[in-house]
Amino acid sequence: MATKSQLQDLELYDHISRCIDEGRLPVHLPERVSAGYGFGSKCHACDQSLTHREIEYSVEDPRNAAAPLSLHLGCYVIWQIECVKRLRKQQQDRANSQPVTPTKSSPIAAGENERGTPATRHT
């Protein structure tokens, strides 16, 4: 499969997203990627063969270091885009779920109003 056509293939994006959802591909940003001509193995993302005319991208699978993931370039790029989206969402969810506690310098904590003057209580 050609890279340009892969990057424009919305069905491939959906397929790779499902692979992640189902645990067939990890949410992972590899530190190293190796590349070489394919030798007939299947792409872990699209299940198509990596032929001897195509470049195969290989990364360590964090779930099983002995069995690397093999992907077409386009599949690798789409997988990484999806991983970044999911990792960013996890970070945002964690940040949004942490309670905000007033600090000593906060007007709320010091019993002041938003202008920094002492808050008055009307009774």
Image: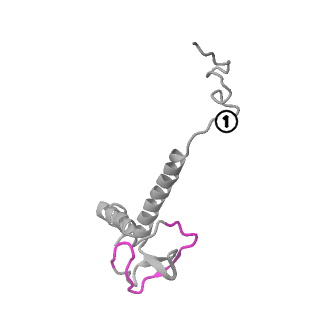
Q: Nearer the viewer, residue 72 or 80?
A: 80
**Looking at numbered disc 1 in the image, what kind of residue is underneath it?**
Thr
Q: Nearer the viewer, residue 120 or 92?
A: 120
Residue furthest out toward the left: 11
Q: Residue at x 32, y 62 (%)?
A: 14
Residue furthest out toward the bottom: 39
Residue 39 visible to the viewer: yes
Q: Residue at x 56, y 42 (%)?
A: 99
Q: What x and y, as percent, mark residue 118?
A: 67, 18
**Left or right position of 26 against 49:** right
Q: Which residues are magenta?
A: 28-48
Which residue is disc 1 drawn over?
A: 103
Residue furthest out toward the right: 104
Q: Quadrant of residue 3?
A: bottom left
Q: What x and y, as percent, mark residue 75?
A: 40, 69
Dot 1 alpha-carbon crowd within 10 angstroms: few under 14, some 14 to 19, many 20 or more:
few
Q: What x and y, as percent, mark residue 91?
A: 52, 52
Q: Is residue 45 magenta?
A: yes
Pick the quarter of the image with the C terminus: top right
Q: Secondary structure at mark 1?
A: loop
Judged by its main secondary structure, the magenta piece is loop
**Left or right position of 31 against 9:** right
Q: What x and y, as percent, mark residue 51?
A: 37, 83
Name above or below for residue 118 compared with residue 87. Answer: above
Q: Is residue 36 magenta?
A: yes
**Left or right position of 39 against 99:** left
